[in-house]
């Protein structure tokens, strides 16, 4: 483990160097902003397959109409579905939001609550882990399209296109998580920054490598540089 961590620390550090304080989205738990597991859960459910800016408007609308888990749990599904329409997958997301809100309204035993959340339809492994990590401070690895893209490029991996279906991608994320914790890095900030690098800098088509805090160690960037030097 010590040897593996030594190899991973430069990547963990450059991800931390991206931003000392990650962006303050209203569903994020940060040093300067504390939110409940319910706020985290709503953010994570809405963010599924949608970009952050589109989620922000709906998130505020939803929270101003239903400010507590119990109110959302008892809301009319049709009304919520109508509100979520601009995001797509509105029917599925409505049912998941209502069920998660019901559990957070009724279940007072945290351990039982976590077990029940795992079984909610529409909560996949990444969403569940994100709720546990960001909402309950329980260290869990994450893997989605954005995180997978950044890590694949930095380390030059040959992962499947759907990263969340790749066992190697999940195992690697877990190793990074363990090494972050072992070396005193906050895993929440680690994953928030990783997500922000993927959304703002390590773009799908044209990554903005010159602005990236990981370009000194990134295999993708190095191979691109080599190619451009060879063409002169
Ligand atoms: S250097 Fe470029 S390819 Fe590598 S992580 Fe940064 S933005 Fe992505």
Image (tube, rainbow, N blue to C red):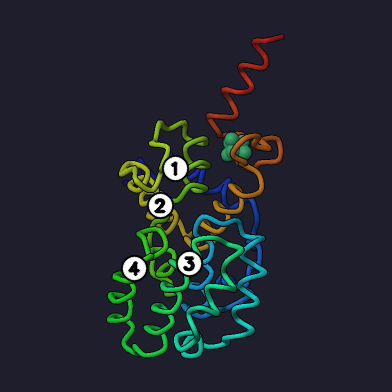
175 or 112, nearer to the observer = 112
Residue matched to label 1: 8
What's the distance in space between the residues labelled 1 and 3, CA to CA? 30 Å
Residue 95 position in % (x across, y down): 42, 73
Cβ atoms under marks 1 and 3 closer than 8 Å: no
91 or 141, nearer to the observer = 91
First-in-chain label (2 vs 3):
3
Residue at left 59%, top 73%?
83
Looking at the picture, does residue 86 appear above or below residue 77?
above
What's the distance in space between the residues labelled 2 and 4, CA to CA? 32 Å
First-in-chain label (4 vs 3):
3
First-in-chain label (1 vs 2):
1
Residue matched to label 3: 45
Q: Residue 121 carries which label?
A: 4
Instruction: For ligand 1, tell me if the residue under mark 4 lies within 8 Å.
Output: no
Cβ atoms under marks 2 and 4 closer than 8 Å: no
Residue at left 67%, top 69%?
57
Judged from the image, the quadrant occupied by ligand 1 is top right
Q: Which of marks 2 and 3 is in front?
A: 3
First-in-chain label (1 vs 4):
1
First-in-chain label (2 vs 4):
4
What's the distance in space between the residues labelled 1 and 4, CA to CA? 35 Å
Looking at the picture, does residue 2 appear above or below residue 82?
above
At label 4, counting other C-alpha atoms closer than 10 Å, the crowd grade (few under 14, some 14-19, many 20 or more) is few
Looking at the picture, does residue 24 appear above or below residue 109?
above
Q: Nearer the viewer, mark 1 or mark 4?
A: 4
Residue matched to label 2: 179
Q: Nearer the viewer, mark 1 or mark 3?
A: 3
Query: Under tag 2, what secondary structure?
Result: helix
Query: Under tag 3, what secondary structure?
Result: helix
């Amino acid at each position: 483990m010590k040897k593996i961590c030594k190899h991973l620390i430069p990547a963990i550090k450059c991800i931390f160097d991206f931003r000392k304080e990650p962006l303050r989205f209203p569903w994020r738990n940060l040093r300067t902003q504390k939110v409940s597991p319910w706020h985290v859960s709503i953010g994570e459910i809405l963010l599924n397959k949608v970009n952050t800016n589109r989620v922000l408007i709906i998130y505020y609308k939803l929270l101003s109409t239903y400010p507590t888990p119990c109110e959302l749990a008892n809301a009319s599904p049709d009304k919520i579905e109508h509100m979520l329409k601009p995001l797509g997958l509105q029917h599925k997301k409505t049912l998941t939001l209502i069920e998660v809100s019901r559990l957070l309204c009724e279940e007072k035993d945290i351990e039982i609550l976590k077990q029940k959340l795992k079984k909610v339809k529409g909560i996949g492994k990444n969403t569940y882990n994100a709720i546990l990590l960001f909402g309950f401070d329980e260290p869990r690895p994450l893997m989605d399209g954005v995180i997978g893209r950044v890590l694949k490029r930095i380390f030059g991996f040959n992962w499947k296109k759907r990263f969340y279906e790749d066992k190697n991608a999940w195992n690697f994320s877990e190793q990074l998580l363990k090494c972050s914790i072992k070396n005193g890095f906050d895993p929440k900030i680690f994953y928030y920054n990783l997500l922000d690098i993927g959304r703002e800098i390590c773009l799908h088509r044209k990554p903005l490598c010159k602005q990236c805090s990981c370009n000194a160690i990134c295999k993708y960037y190095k191979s691109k540089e080599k190619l451009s030097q060879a063409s002169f």
